[in-house]
């Protein structure tokens, strides 16, 4: 089976009330990406990894809590729910609030069934996990909360339920059995990021301007969240992904989280991991290439450009379309390092992945005010091996890849001949693209590189005209 990928243009206003930073959302599957080969239930089996003597669990592992949460109201009940919201107090949502509604509604945060009430918030903030009724623990390293201001709190009054209104003014969900509690922003920031330094992107965008109260409750989402940006076919829910893994007879799923373009070093890593899994005895390991699709900081490459670049990687055969699924992970990005990487891993458990690739400084960034990394580059992968509630996920540490000047290609770094290797940082890559320069041959597939050059040059031309 192969995936045919088609370029097209769109400039539609998406349902979240904003336009993409990059106006041309070109790349999309020209058919529904849920292409079925043959439906087959995957049987549970266990392999032994002799390198670390840990038990490696295969097949689609259970979602956290045992059942995948699905909070989308059935179509048969939609009209009655819509009539009900007319008399409810209204809470207005921001674009990023809507991204969290999307995340919760599809079960990425299972077993969470809505925005956190105070007891859930405190567990997440202080312990990075939630304790279930049976005493078991599931990972939940990021608080998923909804902030409101004094005026909204007063308007709600003693109401038990509220309607959530999207940026375009349409009611998108109901929050049932609500609880309102204090939003201590400084505590939330300090415990999530480990610092209160100015310049943290998510803090500046979301937390600082938000209200001083948090409202939690059980969520009922009136219809699936759509963005109408030409990329909705890539936004596969955990339920859809599990169905696709089973249809492809996957006996292992390994997930790769990214928010950057894919270069040949990434591809080398992913292809090497599939080879290693085959050597372990798995018959059909499937790669979930899973770029983050929610809020990102201003200097990150926009989602539509990244998706077009990823499509070129598959078109050129750098990654095999038959053993790769490209889908969008709808979560916003916090840039919270070892705290956030747990969330990224946990969400992929709910999608059915039993292997997770982790590398240098996952979910990290440069310190906003000092010339250093905000987090220790190795702490993310170390934390994942110890984090509560992630014991059923197999962590695959990233091998370091760099450009081998001797072989003229991306290769795994060999410290015995370190002088032969060139490390091309994201900053250096962007500088190449902005200047219209080509990186060394073999760094990225030419068609994928062309996508980046066109984006940066069009952005520069737009900035100059303004």
Image (cartoon, rainbow, N blue to C red):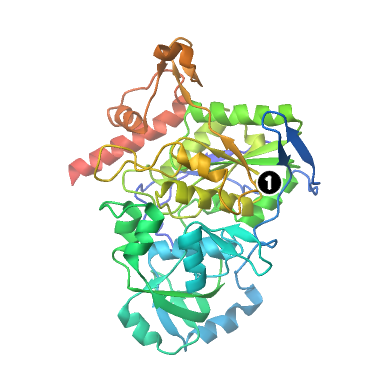
Q: Nearer the viewer, residue 442 or 278?
A: 278
Residue 88 visible somewhere in the drawing: yes
Question: Which residue reaches farthest top?
Answer: 406
In the image, taking residue 290 as reference, residue 9 lies left or right, namely left
| Residue 172 percent across, percent down from the top left | 49, 72
* Numbered label tally: 1
**Mark 1, secondary structure of its residue:** loop
Q: Is residue 323 above or below residue 190?
A: above
**Which residue is found at the position 62% from the left and 35% from the top?**
321
Q: Quadrant of residue 26?
A: top left
Picture quadrant of residue 130 = bottom right
Residue drawn at x 29%, y 57% as measured from the top left: 204
Percent position of residue 334, x then y: 40, 52
Residue 226 visible in the snapshot: no
- What residue appears at the point 34 percent right and 43 percent down from the top-left corner? 374
In which quadrant is the N terminus drawn? top right
Residue bearing the label numbered 1: 35
Q: Relative to 237, is 145 on the left or the right?
A: left
Estimate the x, y position of residue 304 in percent, counting from the top left.
43, 46
Closer to the camera, 154 or 40? 154
Give the image location of residue 13, x and y in percent.
39, 59
Give me the residue at 35% from left, 63% from top: 187
Left or right: 396 with respect to 463? right
């Amino acid at each position: 089976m192969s995936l045919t990928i088609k370029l097209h243009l769109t400039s539609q206003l998406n349902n979240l009330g904003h336009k993409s930073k990059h106006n041309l959302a070109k790349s999309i599957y020209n058919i529904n990406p849920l292409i079925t080969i043959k439906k087959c239930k995957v049987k549970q089996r266990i392999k032994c990894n002799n390198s670390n003597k840990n038990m490696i669990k295969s097949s689609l592992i259970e979602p956290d809590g045992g059942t995948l949460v699905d909070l989308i109201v059935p179509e048969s009940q939609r009209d009655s729910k819509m009539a009900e919201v007319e008399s409810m107090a209204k809470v207005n949502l921001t674009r990023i609030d809507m991204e969290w509604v999307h995340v919760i509604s599809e079960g990425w945060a299972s077993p969470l069934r809505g925005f956190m009430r105070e007891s859930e918030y405190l567990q997440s903030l202080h312990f990075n996990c939630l304790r279930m009724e049976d005493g078991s623990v599931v990972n939940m390293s990021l608080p998923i909360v909804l902030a409101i201001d004094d005026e909204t709190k007063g308007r709600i009054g003693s109401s038990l339920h509220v309607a959530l209104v999207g940026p375009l003014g349409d009611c998108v969900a109901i929050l049932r059995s609500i609880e309102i509690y204090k939003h201590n922003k400084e505590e939330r920031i300090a415990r999530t990021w480990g610092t209160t330094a100015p310049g943290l992107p998510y803090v500046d965008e979301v937390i600082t301007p938000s209200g001083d109260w948090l409202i939690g409750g059980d969520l009922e989402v009136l219809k699936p969240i759509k963005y109408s940006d030409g990329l909705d076919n890539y936004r596969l829910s955990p339920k859809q992904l599990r169905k696709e893994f089973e249809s492809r007879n996957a006996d292992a799923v390994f997930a790769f989280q990214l928010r950057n373009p894919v270069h040949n070093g990434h591809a080398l890593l992913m292809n090497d991991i599939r080879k290693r899994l085959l050597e372990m005895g798995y018959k059909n390991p499937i790669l979930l290439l899973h770029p983050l699709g929610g809020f990102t900081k201003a200097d990150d490459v926009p989602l539509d450009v990244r998706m077009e670049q990823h499509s070129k990687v598959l078109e050129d055969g750098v990654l095999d379309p038959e053993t790769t699924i490209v889908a969008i992970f709808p979560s916003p990005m916090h840039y919270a390092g070892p705290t956030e990487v747990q969330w990224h891993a946990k969400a992929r458990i709910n999608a059915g992945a039993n292997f997770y690739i982790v590398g240098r400084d996952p979910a990290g960034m440069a310190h906003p005010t000092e010339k250093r990394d905000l987090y220790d580059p190795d702490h993310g992968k170390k934390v994942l091996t110890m984090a509560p509630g992630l014991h059923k996920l197999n962590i695959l540490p990233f091998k370091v890849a760099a450009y081998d000047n001797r072989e003229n290609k991306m290769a795994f770094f060999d410290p015995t001949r370190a002088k032969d290797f060139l490390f091309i940082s994201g900053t250096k890559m962007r500088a190449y693209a902005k200047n219209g320069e080509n990186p060394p041959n073999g760094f990225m597939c030419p068609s994928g590189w062309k996508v980046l050059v066109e984006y940066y040059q069009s952005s520069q031309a737009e900035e100059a005209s303004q």
